[in-house]
Image (cartoon, rainbow, N blue to C red):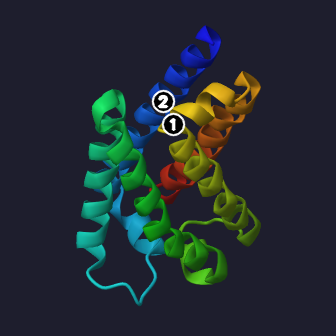
């Protein structure tokens, strides 16, 4: 039981740090996010700023138990809202060429939102957490780190 709590807190802290750093990227690397923004979505820059702000706010809400429920639902809704950008990223050669990423690498990014969604759901369902085996949480940090490092490398490369 204690190990599960420690593992949950560690996963929450890793997720919190990565969400904050990703939220900051929305402000510092706008051109990369603009590249993957589907043309049918209006107000591209506003949507990027809003996504970054929400990413940071939800990450900070993760720290406090009282706001974690709302944070989890917020992240779930945000992940669903930004998923069309990832689909556009996969299907369109325009953002792939702008960011020098292959279609295969764009495809690899798509499924990584599902473990994040699952983690958000598990993070606020205490009953589920208590019945979950600790090894089930072990794939969340690698999933997040892989996605983050893949995106980070291409964001860095795109400014060279």
**Residue at x 52% of width, y 69% of height:** 83
Residue extending furthest top? 2
Q: Image height check: is 138 above or below 34? A: above
> Is the residue 21 above or below the residue 33 in the image?
above
Query: On the picture, is 74 further left or further right than 91?
Result: left
Can I make out residue 1 in this image? yes
Q: Residues within 10 Å of mark 2 (few under 14, many from 20)?
A: many
Quadrant of the drawing holding the N terminus = top right
Residue at 31%, 65% in the rendered image: 48
From the top left corner, tell me how far across and down residue 148 is, in percent: 56, 44
Q: Is residue 18 above or below residue 32?
A: above
- Disc 1 is placed on an element classified as helix
In this rendering, would 117 be left or right of 47? right
Image marks 1 and 2: residues in contact by CB distance under 8 Å = yes
| Residue depicted at 74% across the width and 26% down the height | 133
Q: Nearer the viewer, residue 109 or 120?
A: 120
Taking 98 as reference, is 50 above or below it? above
Front residue (pair 156, 142)? 142
Q: Compare residues 12 and 130 and report the one nearer the observer.
A: 130
* Secondary-structure class at tag 2: helix
Q: Which residue is mark 2?
A: 12
Nearer-the-camera pick, 146 or 124: 124
User: Dot 1 corresponds to which residue?
Assistant: 123
Q: Position of residue 69 (x, y in %)?
A: 37, 42
Question: Left of 97 or right of it: where is 77?
Answer: left
């Amino acid at each position: 039981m204690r190990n599960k709590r420690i593992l949950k807190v560690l996963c929450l802290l890793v997720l919190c740090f990565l969400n904050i750093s990703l939220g900051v990227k929305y402000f510092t690397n706008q051109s990369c996010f603009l590249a993957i923004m589907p043309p049918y979505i209006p107000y591209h820059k506003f949507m990027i700023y809003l996504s970054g702000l929400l990413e940071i706010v939800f990450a900070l809400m993760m720290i406090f138990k009282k706001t974690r429920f709302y944070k989890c639902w917020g992240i779930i809704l945000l992940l669903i809202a930004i998923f069309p950008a990832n689909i556009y990223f996969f299907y369109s050669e325009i953002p792939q060429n702008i960011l020098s990423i292959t279609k295969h690498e764009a495809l690899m990014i798509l499924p990584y939102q599902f473990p994040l969604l699952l983690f958000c759901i598990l993070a606020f369902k205490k009953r589920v957490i208590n019945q979950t085996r600790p090894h089930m949480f072990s794939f969340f940090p690698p999933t997040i780190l892989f996605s983050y490092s893949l995106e980070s490398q291409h964001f860095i490369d795109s400014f060279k």
